[in-house]
Amino acid sequence: MPDETSTPSPRSGVPGSILPAAGGPQDVFYGRDRKVHVPLPLIERAEGIYMWDADGNRYIDASSGPIVSNIGHGVTSVGDAMARQVREMDFAYPRVARNQPNMDMTARVAELAGPGFERVCFASGGSEAIEVAVKFLRQYTIVNGQPSRHHVITCMPSYHGGTLGALAWSGDDSIVEFLDGMIEISPKIPAPLTYRLPDNHTVESYAMSCVDALRQTIKELGPENVLAFMIEPVGGVASGCNVPHESFFREVRKICTDNGIYLIFDEVMSGTGRTGKFLAAHHWPDALPDIAVLAKGLGSGYVPLGAMLAPAAMVDFISDRTGFDYTHTYTSNPVCCAAGMAVLDYTVKNNLMDNATEMGTYLRGKLLAMKDTSRLVGDVRGLGLLMSVELVADQAEKTPLPADSEAADRVRIHALDNGLILYSRRTSGGRFGDWFIVAPPLTITRDECDDLIDRLGATLKGLEDDLVSLGYLPAA
């Protein structure tokens, strides 16, 4: 058993200079020419909110990977369900056979999602599920006699996945050159951000200006040519857990309804209980989307699993005519569905959605208090146990840290030194700031929250000292 109180030493891994001639870890594909090198620990064991590396160092999985591990690590009931299903029946292709785990899982997801989401189409992850949603709507409008509807309006910044289609719908300046000539980039409106607003705007007035931008974009494109408006109800890796003003949801719901445009909520990160409700959409019941997309927490890291949730009326309309033709080999994989059922059972049995609300409120208060102890903390935002901390050079002016400070990378290094694994980002080359996500497994306890905060305080102190010594910040 590793020493649970040990201070992490240099992390085990495979440095770029000693990569094997063949094979290697997944990160051989990632950039190694960055100004700041973030070592990657070699994780050998995980349980609850904790992970242990090959040197025996223990870390808190403070961001649940990329906001995946909702139920925590090492839940034996999930592994048992997977093993049992593999022994009984490992695979049945849905175009030639049915399987019971698929039928059980669709019924359970629909039950938790509520009215309007009676039909569930599974996928192998978030990007695939996003594409399934858009393809489904496209086919629906064609069958329904509206073939001109093809534009998908999204926000800048936003992130909807890593496939070509999902990247084209994402709002990130840094990928425009990559996509140029490959695929049509979707029309964008400004995201209804809540931090660093233009002059003379409140959070609500800025949200309404984004609503006006949506109206104008629809007018310019022609409402008859617009298929959908897609948004993350709680932002993910592009906006750092931005939560739009509630009026935004009401207004965009009305605009979409009035123009026959479908509203998609990308809940790849925010869904499956992470915000305290099964869908983040449930926080705004008067603005429910037509389509919701889940992933990440749906399989909780145990299996790759995503889902598109749609109304029965729409699915049955297509099914009675052409059918939906664009599914994949592993749609409704029985092992993944068995694991997903075990994840949902564990979530409900252990009241993890309620815990996300309770511990999210507690942790948010602790993070807000850090504004008084660290001048780097500019903003704390999010919902439930999906939060981010925005890093700044000046709290009063909300000044971002210099782009060449590589603060998003440096904070990860200091986090590792203090026994935390953090997910951090800077979107569009830093145009929307540097931040890190605080989204531990939904199983986290109050004592574990306190431990996380203590380690995070030491992390921010180390980062501040680092930035001062390098000349990116003046001495306090």
Image: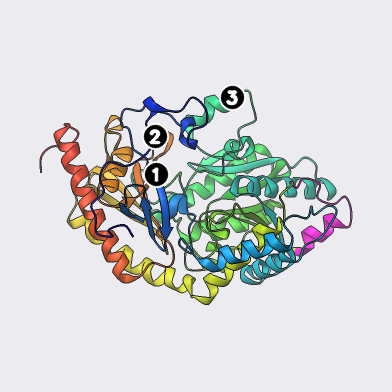
Question: Separation of disc 2 and disc 1 at Cα?
Answer: 9 Å
Earlier-in-chain disc, 3 versus 2 = 2
Numbered mark located on residue 463 in the image:
none
Question: Secondary structure beneath disc 3?
Answer: loop
Asked if residue 367 can be seen in this view, the reply is: no
Asked if 68 appears above or below 142 in the picture, the reply is below
Question: Separation of disc 3 and disc 2 at Cα?
Answer: 34 Å
Local crowd size for mark 2, using a 10 Å CA cut-off: few (<14), some (14–19), many (≥20): some
Q: Which residues are magenta?
A: 312-328
Question: Separation of disc 1 and disc 3 at Cα?
Answer: 37 Å
Earlier-in-chain disc, 2 versus 1 = 2
Residue 392 position within the rendered picture, expressed as x and y whole percent measured from the top left: 26, 43
Numbered mark located on residue 42 in the image:
1
For the residues bearing labels 2 and 1, Cβ distance under 8 angstroms? yes
Left or right, 335 with respect to 385, comes to right
Question: Secondary structure beneath disc 1?
Answer: loop
Numbered mark located on residue 180 in the image:
3
Left or right, 1 with respect to 185, comes to left
Local crowd size for mark 3, using a 10 Å CA cut-off: few (<14), some (14–19), many (≥20): few
